[in-house]
Image (cartoon, helix red, strand yellow):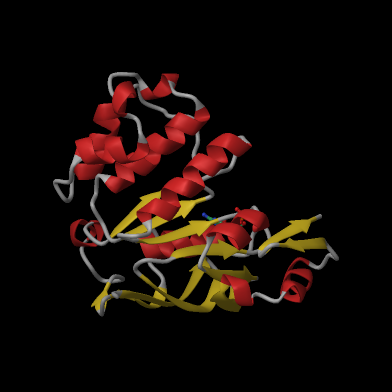
Protein backbone atom coordinates (compact mmCIF):
# COMPACT_ATOMS: atom_id res chain seq x y z
CA UNK A 1 0.00 0.00 0.00
CA UNK A 2 1.26 3.53 -0.76
CA UNK A 3 2.77 5.22 2.28
CA UNK A 4 2.74 8.83 3.46
CA UNK A 5 5.96 9.80 5.20
CA UNK A 6 6.17 13.03 7.18
CA UNK A 7 9.17 14.50 8.98
CA UNK A 8 8.82 18.27 9.25
CA UNK A 9 9.73 21.35 11.21
CA UNK A 10 7.87 24.62 10.93
CA UNK A 11 8.15 28.08 12.50
CA UNK A 12 5.81 31.06 12.58
CA UNK A 13 8.51 33.77 12.63
CA UNK A 14 10.87 32.87 15.47
CA UNK A 15 8.37 30.52 17.09
CA UNK A 16 9.17 26.94 16.18
CA UNK A 17 5.84 25.13 16.26
CA UNK A 18 6.84 21.75 14.78
CA UNK A 19 10.14 20.10 15.66
CA UNK A 20 11.01 17.15 13.43
CA UNK A 21 7.44 15.91 13.71
CA UNK A 22 7.67 12.46 12.17
CA UNK A 23 5.19 9.71 11.35
CA UNK A 24 4.17 7.49 8.50
CA UNK A 25 0.82 5.99 7.54
CA UNK A 26 -0.63 3.87 4.78
CA UNK A 27 -3.59 3.93 2.44
CA UNK A 28 -6.42 1.98 4.11
CA UNK A 29 -5.82 3.57 7.53
CA UNK A 30 -7.74 6.11 9.56
CA UNK A 31 -5.15 8.08 11.50
CA UNK A 32 -5.96 10.45 14.36
CA UNK A 33 -3.69 13.30 15.35
CA UNK A 34 -4.33 14.26 18.95
CA UNK A 35 -2.64 16.43 21.57
CA UNK A 36 -3.24 19.43 23.83
CA UNK A 37 -4.46 22.80 22.51
CA UNK A 38 -1.78 24.72 20.69
CA UNK A 39 0.53 21.72 20.26
CA UNK A 40 0.77 22.13 16.48
CA UNK A 41 -1.84 19.68 15.14
CA UNK A 42 -3.51 22.09 12.70
CA UNK A 43 -0.12 23.40 11.63
CA UNK A 44 1.03 19.85 10.85
CA UNK A 45 -2.10 19.22 8.78
CA UNK A 46 -1.60 22.50 6.88
CA UNK A 47 2.01 21.50 6.13
CA UNK A 48 0.86 18.16 4.67
CA UNK A 49 -1.88 19.95 2.72
CA UNK A 50 0.67 22.35 1.25
CA UNK A 51 -0.94 25.45 2.77
CA UNK A 52 2.23 26.02 4.79
CA UNK A 53 5.70 25.19 3.55
CA UNK A 54 7.69 23.27 6.18
CA UNK A 55 11.33 22.31 6.36
CA UNK A 56 11.86 18.58 5.97
CA UNK A 57 10.22 15.83 4.00
CA UNK A 58 6.67 14.84 3.12
CA UNK A 59 6.25 12.11 0.54
CA UNK A 60 3.47 9.88 -0.68
CA UNK A 61 4.35 6.74 -2.55
CA UNK A 62 7.86 8.25 -2.77
CA UNK A 63 6.59 11.42 -4.51
CA UNK A 64 7.95 14.54 -2.77
CA UNK A 65 4.92 16.65 -1.80
CA UNK A 66 6.75 19.68 -0.35
CA UNK A 67 7.99 20.87 -3.72
CA UNK A 68 5.15 19.62 -5.87
CA UNK A 69 3.13 22.19 -7.83
CA UNK A 70 -0.25 22.86 -6.16
CA UNK A 71 -2.28 21.36 -8.97
CA UNK A 72 -0.22 18.18 -8.88
CA UNK A 73 -0.41 18.04 -5.08
CA UNK A 74 -4.19 18.38 -5.25
CA UNK A 75 -4.31 15.08 -7.13
CA UNK A 76 -2.75 13.38 -4.10
CA UNK A 77 -3.96 15.33 -1.05
CA UNK A 78 -7.29 16.95 -0.17
CA UNK A 79 -7.95 19.06 2.90
CA UNK A 80 -11.13 19.62 4.88
CA UNK A 81 -10.63 22.76 6.99
CA UNK A 82 -12.18 23.37 10.37
CA UNK A 83 -15.81 24.10 9.67
CA UNK A 84 -16.87 27.73 9.96
CA UNK A 85 -19.97 29.42 8.64
CA UNK A 86 -19.88 29.52 4.79
CA UNK A 87 -19.09 32.96 3.39
CA UNK A 88 -20.58 32.49 -0.07
CA UNK A 89 -24.02 31.44 -1.22
CA UNK A 90 -23.12 28.60 -3.54
CA UNK A 91 -25.49 25.73 -4.04
CA UNK A 92 -24.24 22.45 -2.62
CA UNK A 93 -23.55 21.25 -6.16
CA UNK A 94 -21.51 24.34 -7.09
CA UNK A 95 -19.61 24.15 -3.83
CA UNK A 96 -18.64 20.51 -4.36
CA UNK A 97 -17.68 21.31 -7.95
CA UNK A 98 -14.95 23.61 -6.60
CA UNK A 99 -13.12 20.44 -5.55
CA UNK A 100 -12.87 19.27 -9.14
CA UNK A 101 -10.90 22.30 -10.37
CA UNK A 102 -7.47 20.69 -10.23
CA UNK A 103 -8.40 17.14 -10.99
CA UNK A 104 -11.65 17.02 -12.93
CA UNK A 105 -13.17 14.68 -10.32
CA UNK A 106 -16.71 13.41 -10.01
CA UNK A 107 -19.29 15.70 -8.30
CA UNK A 108 -22.11 13.12 -8.56
CA UNK A 109 -20.08 10.42 -6.89
CA UNK A 110 -18.95 12.80 -4.12
CA UNK A 111 -22.54 13.91 -3.39
CA UNK A 112 -23.68 10.29 -3.37
CA UNK A 113 -20.93 9.17 -1.00
CA UNK A 114 -21.85 11.74 1.64
CA UNK A 115 -25.62 11.38 1.04
CA UNK A 116 -26.28 14.97 -0.09
CA UNK A 117 -27.76 14.22 -3.53
CA UNK A 118 -31.18 15.52 -2.52
CA UNK A 119 -29.73 18.79 -1.21
CA UNK A 120 -27.76 19.56 -4.34
CA UNK A 121 -29.75 22.70 -5.23
CA UNK A 122 -29.83 23.98 -1.65
CA UNK A 123 -27.68 26.99 -0.76
CA UNK A 124 -24.81 26.00 1.53
CA UNK A 125 -25.71 28.91 3.81
CA UNK A 126 -28.99 27.09 4.52
CA UNK A 127 -27.45 23.78 5.52
CA UNK A 128 -27.28 22.60 9.10
CA UNK A 129 -23.82 22.34 10.70
CA UNK A 130 -23.76 18.59 10.09
CA UNK A 131 -24.81 18.93 6.45
CA UNK A 132 -22.25 21.67 5.85
CA UNK A 133 -19.54 19.39 7.23
CA UNK A 134 -20.70 16.71 4.78
CA UNK A 135 -20.52 19.30 1.96
CA UNK A 136 -16.94 20.16 2.97
CA UNK A 137 -16.05 16.46 2.86
CA UNK A 138 -17.81 16.07 -0.52
CA UNK A 139 -15.79 18.99 -1.93
CA UNK A 140 -12.59 17.24 -0.82
CA UNK A 141 -13.84 13.89 -2.14
CA UNK A 142 -14.51 15.45 -5.53
CA UNK A 143 -10.75 15.95 -5.82
CA UNK A 144 -10.41 12.19 -6.05
CA UNK A 145 -7.15 12.23 -4.08
CA UNK A 146 -5.70 9.29 -2.16
CA UNK A 147 -4.99 11.22 1.04
CA UNK A 148 -7.72 13.15 2.85
CA UNK A 149 -6.87 15.47 5.75
CA UNK A 150 -9.57 16.72 8.10
CA UNK A 151 -9.21 19.31 10.84
CA UNK A 152 -11.64 18.55 13.67
CA UNK A 153 -14.39 17.19 11.41
CA UNK A 154 -16.82 16.63 14.28
CA UNK A 155 -16.46 19.83 16.27
CA UNK A 156 -19.86 21.43 16.95
CA UNK A 157 -21.72 18.27 15.92
CA UNK A 158 -24.15 16.30 18.06
CA UNK A 159 -23.57 12.60 18.76
CA UNK A 160 -25.76 11.52 15.83
CA UNK A 161 -23.91 13.63 13.26
CA UNK A 162 -20.58 12.80 14.86
CA UNK A 163 -21.33 9.12 14.31
CA UNK A 164 -22.39 9.84 10.73
CA UNK A 165 -19.10 11.58 9.97
CA UNK A 166 -16.94 8.95 11.71
CA UNK A 167 -18.80 6.10 9.96
CA UNK A 168 -18.31 7.92 6.65
CA UNK A 169 -14.57 8.26 7.28
CA UNK A 170 -14.42 4.58 8.20
CA UNK A 171 -15.99 3.70 4.84
CA UNK A 172 -13.75 6.11 2.94
CA UNK A 173 -10.54 4.66 4.35
CA UNK A 174 -11.04 1.54 2.23
CA UNK A 175 -9.82 3.57 -0.72
CA UNK A 176 -7.89 6.32 0.99
CA UNK A 177 -5.60 7.34 3.77
CA UNK A 178 -7.69 9.44 6.16
CA UNK A 179 -5.90 11.68 8.65
CA UNK A 180 -8.03 13.62 11.11
CA UNK A 181 -7.13 16.05 13.88
CA UNK A 182 -9.48 15.12 16.70
CA UNK A 183 -10.01 16.66 20.10
CA UNK A 184 -12.29 13.93 21.29
CA UNK A 185 -10.01 11.21 22.66
CA UNK A 186 -12.84 8.69 22.67
CA UNK A 187 -13.41 9.11 18.94
CA UNK A 188 -9.68 8.69 18.35
CA UNK A 189 -9.55 5.58 20.55
CA UNK A 190 -12.58 3.93 19.03
CA UNK A 191 -12.42 4.83 15.33
CA UNK A 192 -8.78 5.19 14.36
CA UNK A 193 -6.32 2.49 13.37
CA UNK A 194 -3.31 4.59 14.24
CA UNK A 195 -2.71 7.51 16.58
CA UNK A 196 -0.12 10.27 16.45
CA UNK A 197 0.19 12.35 19.62
CA UNK A 198 1.78 15.78 19.45
CA UNK A 199 2.90 17.88 22.37
CA UNK A 200 4.71 21.21 21.90
CA UNK A 201 5.42 20.37 18.28
CA UNK A 202 7.02 17.00 19.02
CA UNK A 203 5.52 13.62 18.22
CA UNK A 204 5.59 12.08 21.70
CA UNK A 205 3.82 8.83 20.80
CA UNK A 206 2.67 7.10 17.63
CA UNK A 207 1.41 3.64 17.00
CA UNK A 208 -1.54 1.33 16.63
CA UNK A 209 -4.54 2.56 18.58
CA UNK A 210 -4.95 -0.59 20.64
CA UNK A 211 -1.29 -0.34 21.71
CA UNK A 212 -1.65 3.16 23.17
CA UNK A 213 -0.90 2.91 26.91
CA UNK A 214 -3.47 5.02 28.69
CA UNK A 215 -0.73 6.38 30.98
CA UNK A 216 0.58 8.24 27.92
CA UNK A 217 -2.67 10.24 27.95
CA UNK A 218 -2.04 11.15 31.60
CA UNK A 219 1.48 12.29 30.79
CA UNK A 220 0.56 14.27 27.69
CA UNK A 221 -2.44 16.10 29.10
CA UNK A 222 -1.10 16.34 32.66
CA UNK A 223 -4.29 15.10 34.28
CA UNK A 224 -5.52 11.90 35.82
CA UNK A 225 -8.54 10.97 33.72
CA UNK A 226 -10.83 8.04 34.53
CA UNK A 227 -10.53 5.11 32.16
CA UNK A 228 -13.26 2.56 31.49
CA UNK A 229 -12.73 -0.54 29.42
CA UNK A 230 -15.39 -3.00 28.37
CA UNK A 231 -15.57 -5.50 25.50
CA UNK A 232 -12.62 -3.89 23.76
CA UNK A 233 -14.13 -0.39 23.97
CA UNK A 234 -11.95 2.09 25.82
CA UNK A 235 -13.42 5.28 27.24
CA UNK A 236 -11.60 8.23 28.78
CA UNK A 237 -13.52 10.53 31.12
CA UNK A 238 -12.16 13.83 32.36
N1 LIG B 1 -0.66 32.11 11.76
C1 LIG B 1 -0.03 31.97 12.93
N2 LIG B 1 0.92 32.87 13.32
C2 LIG B 1 1.58 32.73 14.48
N3 LIG B 1 1.37 31.72 15.37
C3 LIG B 1 0.44 30.81 15.04
C4 LIG B 1 -0.31 30.89 13.82
N4 LIG B 1 -1.15 29.83 13.77
C5 LIG B 1 -0.95 29.12 14.91
N5 LIG B 1 0.01 29.71 15.66
C6 LIG B 1 0.51 29.23 16.95
O1 LIG B 1 1.13 27.96 16.72
C7 LIG B 1 0.85 27.08 17.81
C8 LIG B 1 0.22 25.81 17.25
O2 LIG B 1 -1.04 26.14 16.68
P1 LIG B 1 -1.97 25.02 16.02
O3 LIG B 1 -3.22 25.70 15.61
O4 LIG B 1 -1.20 24.27 15.02
O5 LIG B 1 -2.23 24.07 17.28
P2 LIG B 1 -3.33 22.97 17.51
O6 LIG B 1 -2.66 21.85 18.19
O7 LIG B 1 -4.05 22.69 16.26
O8 LIG B 1 -4.30 23.76 18.52
P3 LIG B 1 -5.84 23.55 18.90
O9 LIG B 1 -5.95 22.16 19.46
O10 LIG B 1 -6.05 24.58 19.96
O11 LIG B 1 -6.65 23.78 17.68
C9 LIG B 1 -0.05 27.84 18.77
O12 LIG B 1 0.76 28.35 19.81
C10 LIG B 1 -0.62 28.97 17.93
O13 LIG B 1 -0.87 30.10 18.71
Question: 209 or 217: nearer the eye?
Answer: 209
> Which quadrant holds residue 51?
bottom left
156 to the left or right of 23: right
Instruction: Name the outermost residue toward the front.
Output: 231
> Which quadrant holds residue 120?
top left
Q: Is residue 154 above or below residue 13?
A: above
Q: What residue is at 81 percent from the left and 68 percent from the top?
A: 222
Q: What residue is at 23 percent from the left and 52 percent from the top?
A: 144
Question: 102 or 138: nearer the eye?
Answer: 138
Residue 159 seen in the figure: yes
Residue 15 seen in the figure: no
Q: Could you tell me residue 104's position as x and y percent?
A: 14, 46
Q: What residue is at 50 percent from the left and 67 percent from the top?
A: 193
Q: Could you tell me residue 65's position as x and y percent?
A: 28, 70
Q: What residue is at 44 percent from the left and 30 percent from the top?
A: 131
Q: Is residue 189 above or below residue 131?
A: below
Amino acid sequence: MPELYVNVSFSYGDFEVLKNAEFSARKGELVSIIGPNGSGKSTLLKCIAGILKPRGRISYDDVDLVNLRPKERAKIVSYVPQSSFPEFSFTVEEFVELGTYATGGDVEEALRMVGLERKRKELITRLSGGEYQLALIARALAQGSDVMLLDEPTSHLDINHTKEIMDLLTRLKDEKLIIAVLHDLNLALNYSDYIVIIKKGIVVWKGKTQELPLEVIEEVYGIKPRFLESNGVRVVLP
